Structures are given as structure tokens and as C-alpha cells.
Image: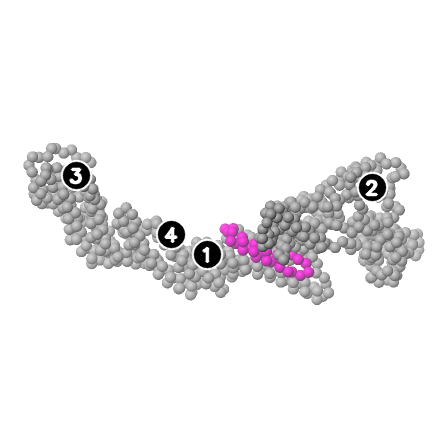
Amino acid sequence: GILAMSAPSSKIIQFEDGWDKEIKAKALDPLERMLNEGLKRDQTKLFNNQDYAATYKTCYDMCTQRTPYNWSEDLYRKHGETVQKYLQKYVLPALKDKQDEYLLKELQHRWKNHIIMNKWLQKFFMYLDRYYVKHHSLATLAISGLRNFKSLVYDEVKRDVANAMLAIVDFEREGKDIDRTLLKQVVELFETMGMGGLDAYTEDLEEPLLTSTRTFYARRREDWIASDSTPDYLIKAEASLDEEKARVTNYLNSHSEPKVLKVCEEELLEKCQKILLEKEGSGCKVLLMNDKTSDLERMFRLFNRIENGLVPMAAIVREFIESVGNAVIEKKKAKVQAMKAEGQKEKPDDPEYVKSLLSCHAKYVDLIKVHLANHALFQKALKDAFVTVMNAEVCDYTNAELLSTYCDRILKAGGDKLSEEEVEMNMERAVELFTYIEDKDFFGEVFRNQLAKRLLNQKSASDDLEKSMISKLKAQVGTQFTSKMEGMLNDLSTALDHEKKFKEFRESESEKGKCDLDVSVQVLTTGNWPTYKKPELALPAVMQPAVDQFSRFFDSDAEKRKLAWYFSLGSVKMKATFYGKGGEKDKKSYDVEVTTLQAAALSAFVDGCSYTFEELGTKLNLEAQYLKPVMHSLCCGKYKVIAKSPANNKINPADTFTANKKFKNNNKRVKIPMASLDSNVNVKKVTEDRSVTIDAALVRIMKSRKTMSHQTLVAEVLAQLTLFKPQAK
């Protein structure tokens, strides 16, 4: 508080009288005595107001007398000497014979006393601080007191104190209980000795602490590496890091946390990372193999703490995923080899193989997403592994064909019994695998052919699912990739409108143009669909009027579009009656489902006619390449509705054909399959399309750049080609 002072007395105070008889005798000696004898708990008021005021007044008077009796300078000097003498006489000797925790306790006690002494001296000599110190730009009494403690006590004992503290810290690291409050108080002393900064704490305590931490954990590392598995080691390492973090919170300065943790990370993780990751029986690969997700999470967490610490872990993950994918391929190869050894052919439909790849991919997508924080390094590891797997050589069929055939299977009516949600999920996963395939254009060609078959044969399970699959592909590789597929679906969606108009047209035609057959015509846009063989079939008289009638309708409805008939794609339902030896009595009728080509051939054999291969070809206007598969399906398949001579399973130009009078079947409805005239995928077309795409890219780049080196041009073209990976020759 502020003291109200009376005017100075006229009597001059001599320095010795004022100091020895008043200030020292009545204030300083009692203060030292109280500190040495020990204060009562929480005792802060050592002097009553009267005693304090008397000492203050003496100081005030001594500082306000006129020169040569102004004792301000002498009092300031004496204040410093008082502190110094006390520290040298009582404090230093008390600390010199102490060690370990006792040294810390004594220091803490003496420091507490010093704070009290400093405070009271500051109060007694307050007038000095207000005028003399300010006027002469000297250190305040409080700072002067701290400086004396630093130079006389702290600098003498700081090394021993730091060593004692470090021994106690190690003691705690061994799991023993320690007096954390004491350590926190001593840390506060180190902080105060920085005089407003942290230099003293950093140099005198933190640096030795970091050195001893490094030594401690280097020893731990050697012990643990020798005895523990990787997961056990990492559990201990993580616990140690948590303990060190808590240790800083409990009694060290918060600035030490990153430094202490960095030392621990270097010693426990960086220096033995390779050993831990590759440890036999418990390294990263073994954890992946045994689905030890929590151990992998911990490994990720810890190595994520060190710079580039995840790079070697990601490399192992990539290698492992690749090996799992390759194992699936090897299993497939062995299966195909066994089939071939038994004389069977490989088929492009291998759902088990594709499901294995799908589940393998889904498993590691999930692992990375849930347990490895979906980290970019591991996403890349998964991608790199699956790019290798999906573009590896399998057997006769590529992964692109096998994957597309799997999609065909789940989108086909009567395929795998899956719910709509399951089909959606499988499509989603299949498209994820598709993104890794380098020859995306080849997959697209296979998929488009299979889509065409599903649509034309009414085998598609659902239009919505077809659209969903196409939109998934579109999202990955763009409109150009899916535009033809969308065009195919669009053709079919306009078919109903066509059918309705055609029906109206038929009803409006005069009697002479009418056709008795029930006809449905599918109009396709040439550019959208795959290219098909186009045999120029001479239709039976009963079918020709239907074709003529639709042609008239189409010409009236769409003047500028040219109509071409693809009889190889059509289908016919016809009634066939077979007469046995007994004539009318022995007749049997069947509902036969066949292709248009088969129907035309069957019509030729009405009324027991017989033909040679050549004669039949002339009658139907069919070349041998088209007629052979047609006749093979009718003579050599499951339903031998036509008899051939000589009777064998091959169609030869010298063969003769006639209706099979002996044909019998338990089912009234008979569907006679026929081999397709078109190969599944036109590889030549894919290659030609690639040439066009490369040329277009070259032109585009050169138009915008005008001139560039060959090497840069090649690199630029390769960067633009996303649907296939050309050979950079």
C-alpha cells in the first residue's frame, strides 16, 4: 500500500547509525533469524505494520537528506551485500553437503526463503526503487536479488541439481513413484533463472535431459529388439511415448515436449525401423498375412510420426497385396492347365476367379480406409499392386475379358441369383478393378459386344442396372468411352414407339400388301452397335412379304435413313410337323425356336425335299461359311431335325440333307441353338481405333504447340491416352 509520510525530521541520520542501529538491527537480522529458524506453514506476514513502517521511514529519511548526507547509493550497495552475505553464509553451505533428492529439497526450501527475503527487502527499500534506481537506470531490487541468487547459488549447483533431477526421471521411467511436485518446483526455478527467457532451462536442464533420454531409450531399444516380437515392441514404444508426453505435462516446460518426443522417436523407431518391419515371424508382412489389424494400426500410427516413416511400410503393403493377387492368378493358371490336360477348353466365364480378385481388392481397400487412415501412400500402394495384377498375363483370356464376362453374368437374366443391391455392389467393385486395366478400350469392346447380345436376345436382367453400370464406367473414363453403349440402350427405348407406328401402318395397308405373320423388327443405329456378318439370305416366300411391308413403312417414316437387314441376328418361332413312316398317323408337331437363318433352311425341307450342300446354298443364297454352322446346328446338335448323309458330325460339301423322319422329342417346345457367326471381339478393330486415337492426339498437340522435340511429343501423347497403353516405338 501507499504510506503517508510526515516531513523528514530536521535531525541528520548518519549512515552507520541508520544502518546498524535501525535497518539491520530491527529488520534485516530478525528477517534472517526467522528464515533460518524456519517459518510456520503459510506464514507470510513476518513484520507488523508498525515495525515495517519504522524501517521504511528510516530508509526514506536516509534517501531524502541533502548531499552529502543522502545515503541512497550506500543503501543500494548495502542491499546487494546483504543478499550476497546471506547466500554465502547460510545457503551455499546448506546445499554443498546435499545430494540427490535431498539436494533438490534443500534447494527448493532455500529458493522459497530467497523469494520471501527478496520481497521484504523490496518493501523496506521501496523508496530506492522509486527514485534512485529509476534515475540511475540500475537493476531493480527484485532483479538484483535474483541475479545474486543466480551467480552465487544457481551457477554453483545447477549441474548437480540437473543430474539429481535426471536420476529421478530415470527412476520414474523404471516404474517407481517419485515426488513430481518437488520436480515441478525445481523446474520453475530453472525457468526463473532465465530472467524472462528460457535460456537457463534449455541449456542447464533440457539439453542434459535430452542426452540422458537418448541414452535411456537406446538401452531399452537394444533390450526390446532382442527379446520382443514387432507388435510387443511397438506396444512398449507407444507406451513410452505416451509416458514421456505425460512427463512433460506433469513437471517439465511445455516447450520440451516436441524435443523429448523426437529423441524417443529417433531411438525407438527410426533406428530400428527396417528390423521391426522385416522381423521374421512378426514383421509387417506377417501382420498382413494374419489380418492383425490393431497391430497394423499401431505400426501405422508410430511410423507416421517420423519423417518418411511410412514409405518402407507402404512398399511392403504393395508387395504383399501384389503377391496375394498373383497367388489368385497362379491358382487360375493351374486350374486351366488341369482342364487342358483333360482335353477341355478354357472359357472366358470364370466367376470364382473374378470374385477372388474382387474380394481381395475389397479387403485391402477396407484395410487402408479403416485401419491405415486412408493415407495417400497406401492408396498408391494398393493401386500399384493392382495395376500389376490386373495387367498380368493370365491364360488364353485377359483379365479385361474375364472381368467383362463376369459383369455380363451378373447383368444377364437367369445368371447369378443376386438381389439388385448385390448386383450394384458387384458392379461397383468390378468398375474399381476396371480402372487398373491398361487396355480399357479392349474391355470396352468386349463389354459392348456382350451388352449387344444381352439386349438383342432379350437376356438383360434390368434396363436400370444396365444404365447404372454404364454410368459407373462413364464416371471413371468419360463420355467418349460409353457413348455407343448409351446409343444402344437408346435404340431399344425407341423400339416401342416404332412398333406402335408399324402396327398402325399394317392396319392401314390394303389387302394385297398385308402379311399374316406376326413380325417384330428391331431398328438399330449402325454406329452404335458392333459390326455383324451380313449374309444376303433368300427368304422363304412366307417371310418375304413381312420384310417388304416393314421396308415400305420405314421409307415412309424415316426418309433419309437407309435400311439394311441383318438376318443373322433375327429369331423365329415356327411350328414344325414331322411325319414318320406311318404318314398322318405317325405325325408329331413341335414349337421350334430358331434363328432366321435356321428357319429359312428348315423351310427348304418342307414336303420331304432333299438337297446337296451346294444346292441348298444356291436355294438360300448362302455362302458356305454361313451355311455350314446353320446345317451343323440342325444335323449334328442335340436336336437332329435334319438328317444328313453320310451321317457324321462334320458338314462337308458332298453331303446330302433331308428332313429327319425319325425325329422325336419329349418336349413339345424345342429351342435349337446355333454357333454365332461373329467372333466375340474384333481385335483388329480395336487396333485400328487405337491408330486413329494416336493420330488425333498428335494432331491436337502439334496444332497447339507448333514445334516440339520428338521425346516431348511422345511423352505428351502418352499422357493424353487414358484408354490404352501404346508401345512407345
To which quarter of the image does residue 681 belong? bottom right
Mark linked to residue 719: none
Mark linked to residue 127: 3
Q: Of callouts 4 and 2, which one flags the residue occurring earlier in the amino acid sequence? A: 4
Is the residue marked by circle 2 packed among few (<14), some (14-19), or many (20+) residues within 10 Å? Answer: some
Q: Secondary structure at mark 3?
A: helix
Is the residue marked by circle 4 packed among few (<14), some (14-19), or many (20+) residues within 10 Å? Answer: few
* Range covered by the magenta-colored residues: 373-399
Question: Vertically, is 343 above or below 354?
Answer: below
Q: Of callouts 4 and 3, which one flags the residue occurring earlier in the amino acid sequence? A: 3
**Which residue shows up at 65% across the image and 56% down it?**
399
Q: CA distance from mark 4 to mark 3?
A: 46 Å
Question: Vertically, is 257 above or below 496?
Answer: below
- Give residue 572's position: percent from left, percent from top: 82, 48
- Under mark 3, the amino acid is Tyr
Q: Which residue is mark 2?
A: 551
Q: What count of labels does the image hold?
A: 4
Q: Which residue is mark 1?
A: 309
Q: Is residue 124 magenta?
A: no
Task: For the C terminus, give its image quadrant.
Answer: bottom right
- Under mark 1, the amino acid is Gly
- Under mark 2, the amino acid is Ser
- Under mark 4, the amino acid is Pro
Q: Secondary structure at mark 2?
A: helix
Q: Secondary structure at mark 4?
A: helix
Residue 401 appears in the figure = yes
**Which residue shows up at 20% across the image and 36% down it?**
1
Q: CA distance from mark 4 to mark 2?
A: 84 Å
Q: Which residue is mark 4?
A: 258
Question: Vertically, is 140 above or below 713?
Answer: above
Q: CA distance from mark 1 to mark 4?
A: 17 Å
Q: CA distance from mark 2 to mark 1?
A: 72 Å
